[in-house]
Image: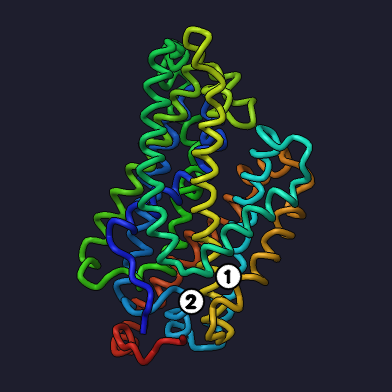
Amino acid sequence: MKTIKIDIQQYFIIIVLFELGSAILVGLGMDAGRDAWIAILLGMVSGMVLFLGYFYLYKQFPEQSLTQYLQILFGKSIGKLFGFLYLMYFMYLAARVLRDFGSLLLSAVFVQTPIIVVNALMIATIVYVLKLGFEVLVRTGEIIFSLVVLLGITLAVLVLSADLLKYNYLLPVLGQGFLPVLKAAFPVTPTFPFGEMVVFTMLFPYLKTSKKSKALTVGLFAIMLSGLILSVTVAMDIAILGGHVATHVYFPLLAAVAKINLGEFIQRLDALVVFTLIIGGFFKISVLFYVAVKATQDIFGVKEEKKLIGPIGIVLILSSIVIAANYVEHIKEGLSIVPHFIHIPFQVVLPSLFIIVFLLRRKKLKSFASSPSTSTE
C-alpha cells in the first residue's frame, strides 16, 4: 500500500530539523526573561507527553495516517471534515513558517527585495524536491544534518573563544519565582514547536516495518535533543545580549552571533546563522507542505500527489503574504494568539477527543485497526 519508506535514522533527523526549524529563529519563551531556557525545558517535557498521545493513536491504526483513521473513527463524512480541518492547520503552519523565513532573509540579506519573491523562490525549491519524491527530501536531510551539526559546533566554539558569554545575565535563576516561568511556558512552548509533532501522525505509517518498534523511543529522544538545543541556544542569547535586549530583538540568535569578533579577522558570522536557519526552515516547510499534500489526497481521493504540489505551493505563497500586515504583527499573533486558539485545539483538544472515541469504540474498531483494506488511498 505504501510506496514511501523512511528509515529510523532519517526519521530522527527529520524530527530534529523540523523541531528546530523556526523555533530557533524567534525568541522562544522570552516572556520568562533570563529564565526563558527553563520555560523551553518545561515545554519540551509537555511536548513529549503530547507525542505519547499521538503515538498511541498511531499504534491503534499502524497502517493509516491521521486523515485516514479519522474516517474509521467517525465514518467518512465526519472523518473527512476533521481531516479537512487538519489540512487547513497544516497549510496554515506552512504559511507561517514561510513568512518567518521570508522576513529573516529580508532583514538580513535581501533588504530591498519584495517578500513575495523570496517566498516564491523558497517554495519553488521545495516543489522541485517534493516532485522528486519525499524520500529524496529525507535523504537530503541526512546529508545536510551533518553540515548543520558542524556549523553549530563551530559557532559554539567561536562564541566561547570570543569570550562573549556573561553568565551573570542568567542570574539569579528563578529570581522572580516559578510562576512567571510557568506563565511564559504555557501554552506557548509546549505547542510551539513540540506540539507541532502532531504533523508526524501523517508520516508514521511510512516508517520501515522493521524499525517501527523503535519509533517511540527515537521520537522522544529527538524531541528531547531538540529541546535541549533550543534551551542552550536561548541561554546563550541571553548570556551574550542580556535579558532585556534578547527579549526585544526580532532574531536573538542572529544578533548574538553578529557580536563575534576574533582579532578583527573572524567576524560577521551572522551569514552562517542565516544559512543554517534557512536549512531548518526549508525542511520544516517541506514536511508541512508534504503532509498537506497527503491530507488533500486522502480527503479528496486524488491519486497523483504530483498534481497537487504546484497548486498547494501557490496557495502557500499567497497565504504567507496575507497572513499578517508586517513581521511585528506576525510574531505577536504567533506567540500570543495562535497557541491558545489554534495550537491547543489541534494539538491537545482534538487528539484527546480521538483517543476517547477510540476507547469507547475499541471493540468495534479493533478489526479495522491493522487492516490495509480500510485505507482511503
Q: Residue at x 44, y 34 (%)?
A: 39
Instruction: Please indicate, yes or no, whether residue 332 appears anywhere in the rendered image.
Output: no
**In the image, what residue type sits under mark 1?**
Leu
**Residue 325 spot, x, y in % from top left:** 79, 46
Q: Looking at the image, which residue is at 51% across and 34% down?
A: 29
Neighbourhood count class around disc 1 (C-alpha, 10 Å): few under 14, some 14–19, many 20 upward: many
Specify how the rendered protein is coloured. rainbow
Is residue 277 depicted above or below 344 in this figure? above
The count of marks equals 2
**Residue 252 vs residue 182: left or right?**
right
Q: Nearer the viewer, residue 361 or 28?
A: 28
Say what amino acid the circle numbered 2 marks. Thr
Residue at 46%, 47% in the rendered image = 190
Q: Which of pointers 1 and 2 lies earlier in the amino acid sequence? A: 2
View extreme (top): residue: 263
| Residue 352, percent from left and from top | 43, 66
Instruction: Characterize the local packing of mark 2: few (<14), some (14-19) or many (20 or more) Cα atoms within 10 angstroms.
Output: many
Q: Circle 1 sits on which residue?
A: 87
Q: Which residue is mark 2?
A: 67
Compared to residue 16, the image places residue 202 above or below, namely below
Q: Position of residue 66 (x, y in %)?
A: 44, 73
Q: Which numbered disc covers residue 119?
A: none
Q: In this orientation, which residue lies closer to the viewer: 371 or 335?
A: 371
User: Tag 1, which secondary structure?
Assistant: helix
Which quadrant would the N terminus be assigned to in this image?
Answer: bottom left
Q: Name, please, the residue furthest toward the front.
A: 265
**Quarter-of-image position of residue 93:** bottom right
Which residue corresponds to the image point at 39% horizontal and 43% vertical from the top-left?
Answer: 44
Q: Nearer the viewer, residue 95 or 306?
A: 306
* Foreground residue among 121 and 99: 121
Whether residue 37 appears in this view of the structure is yes
Placement of 164 over or under 325, stated as above or below: above
